Image (spheres, rainbow, N blue to C red):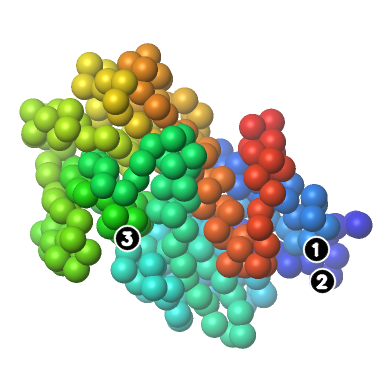
Amino acid sequence: MSFPRATTAVYALLGRPVQHSKSPQLHNAVFDHLGIDAVYVAHEIDKIGPAVAALRQLGYAGANVTMPFKTEVVDHVDVLGDAAREMRAVNTLTFRDGLIMGDNTDGAGLFNEIRRAGTRVAGAKVVLLGTGGAAAAIWTQAALDGVASVKVFNRAKPGLDEIAHRLASLSERSGCDLTLGDLAEREVLAAAVDEADIVVNATAVGMGELAGQSLIERDWISPHHTIADAVYHPRLTKLLEDAREAGARTVEGIRMLLGQAAVCEKIWLGIDMPFEVASAAVNS
């Protein structure tokens, strides 16, 4: 089958930066393997609103949204899925019947991969670094999946009072103990990590200009931990390298990418993503 054609459905990744992204390799490999008349491209953008409007006008079939636009894009969606509404963050857009539908697959993808690593999620204690769109997806999915507690840490910035209120509200409704702490309070963070079963980095620390850095000290990590990083370029961040040296279980960002992509393709096309094909594509 020759691509692209006039009938080819177009999907895209929207974000900044996106040059490092493996999403085009992943989705195009799946489309090719299954003989689906579709192509997936990446667009590096400055503003999310005009980009989403352009995709709608140009007839795109769907898109993924990555940092730093997952929260802002909510204002440009016509219909929000239940999880995305709770998370107030969207990573998956579907253009259908003249509407833009927004969903979030980040949290489900991550926790599916944590389970694959052999770690029990229900009843676990989680430390989560970051309060952006990816982090919101993770703490919400954690509450939905029966995690015992999520201690969220972020640097001081405007808007944290509103995030603390959101966490308290979700805690009351779900029974999961969600709290917000300051990354600058290193002793508090160290104690939280010591008590945690799962530690997740959902910040940009570890990639780009912040490559080679980690918010977690090497000697805080022990074999009882499962350490996950949403960053997947580089594939092994300093956090993951330190975790492996400490004997902890690790979940690379590329595995989170695979997990969320599987849920995306189910939403877009109703298919079960062939993990072997997708994994080979992103690991090549």
Kind of residue indicated by mark 1? Asp
Asked whether 30 or 57 is in front, the reply is 30
Q: Which mark is residue 144?
A: 3
- Horizontal arrangement in the rendering, residue 201 relative to residue 32 (left or right): left
Decide: few, some or many residues near mark 3? Use Cα within 10 Å; few <14, some 14-19, many ≥20.
some
User: CA separation, marks 2 and 3?
Assistant: 39 Å
Q: Nearer the viewer, mark 3 or mark 1?
A: 3
The residue tagged with tag 1: helix, strand or loop? loop
Mark positioned earlier in the residue sequence (2 or 3): 2
The residue tagged with tag 3: helix, strand or loop? helix
Mark positioned earlier in the residue sequence (2 or 1): 2
Mark positioned earlier in the residue sequence (3 or 1): 1
Horizontal and vertical percent position of residue 221: 26, 22
Q: Which residue is mark 2?
A: 7
Q: Nearer the viewer, mark 2 or mark 1?
A: 1
Residue in the image at 67% along x and 75% along y: 59
Q: Locate residue 55: give its quadrant.
A: bottom right
Horizontal and vertical percent position of residue 122: 31, 49
Kind of residue indicated by mark 3? Leu
Which quadrant would the C terminus be assigned to in this image?
top right
Figure check: 143 above or below 224: below
User: CA separation, marks 3 and 1?
Assistant: 35 Å
Decide: few, some or many residues near mark 2? Use Cα within 10 Å; few <14, some 14-19, many ≥20.
few
